[in-house]
Image: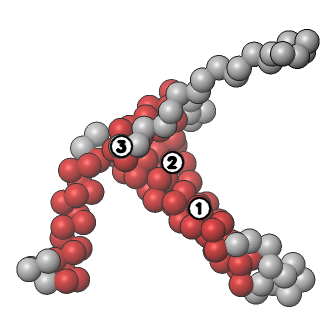
């Protein structure tokens, strides 16, 4: 046994929801409670956030491929994966901003896209 005092354990942070739709709802709730702009302006800014995230995907791809000779390779393909996940999350939260029926709207649209692309038997 040592004479050093034990460090207190940090408080447990709440575990993120492993359910996609519950996580989207939690993120939307948090963003809605902390938004600096409301109404139409807040809605438009939430939609513009998606463009910002897509730009970060482009930046990561350019960085992963070394396309900018001045900077060289600045990102990994794992960074690109993370940025793509940010796009998906941001898009789903934006959709939730437009409708509380996010899951149903997305599922219905995915079925249409899948049928259109793969045929009615998909």
Res. 23 in view: yes
The image quarter in which residue 63 lies: bottom right
| Residue at figure coordinates x 71%, y 20% from the top left | 9
The mark lying in front, picked from 2 and 1, is 1
Q: Are marks 2 and 1 in contact (CB under 8 Å)?
A: no
Whichever of labels 3 and 2 marks the residue nearer the N terminus, that label is 3
Label at residue 99? none
Q: Is residue 121 above or below residue 60?
A: below
Distance (Cα) linking label 2 and label 1? 20 Å
The answer to whether mark 3 and mark 2 are in CB contact below 8 A is: no
**Which residue was labeled with disc 3?**
19
Query: Spatial distance from mark 3 to mark 2, Cα to Cα?
Result: 22 Å
Dot placed on the residue nearer the N-terminal end, 2 or 1: 2
Relative to 20, residue 30 above or below: above
Report the quarter where the C terminus lies.
bottom left
On the image, numbered disc 2 is attached to which residue?
Answer: 46
Secondary structure of the residue carrying numbered label 2: helix
Residue 40 seen in the current view: no
Residues 44 and 56: in front is 56
Which residue is more in the foreground, 102 or 98? Answer: 102
Q: Callout 3: 10 Å neighbours few (<14), some, many (20+)? A: few
């Amino acid at each position: 046994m040592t004479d050093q005092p034990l460090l207190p354990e940090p408080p447990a942070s709440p575990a993120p929801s492993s359910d996609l739709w519950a996580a989207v709802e939690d993120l939307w709730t948090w963003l809605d409670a902390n938004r600096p702009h409301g109404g139409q302006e807040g809605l438009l800014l939430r939609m513009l956030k998606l463009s910002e995230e897509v730009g970060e995907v482009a930046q990561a791809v350019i960085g992963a491929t070394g396309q900018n000779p001045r900077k060289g390779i600045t990102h990994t393909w794992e960074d690109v994966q993370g940025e793509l996940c940010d796009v998906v999350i941001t898009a789903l939260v934006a959709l939730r901003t437009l409708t509380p029926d996010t899951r149903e709207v997305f599922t219905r649209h995915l079925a249409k896209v899948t049928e259109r692309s793969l045929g009615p038997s998909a």
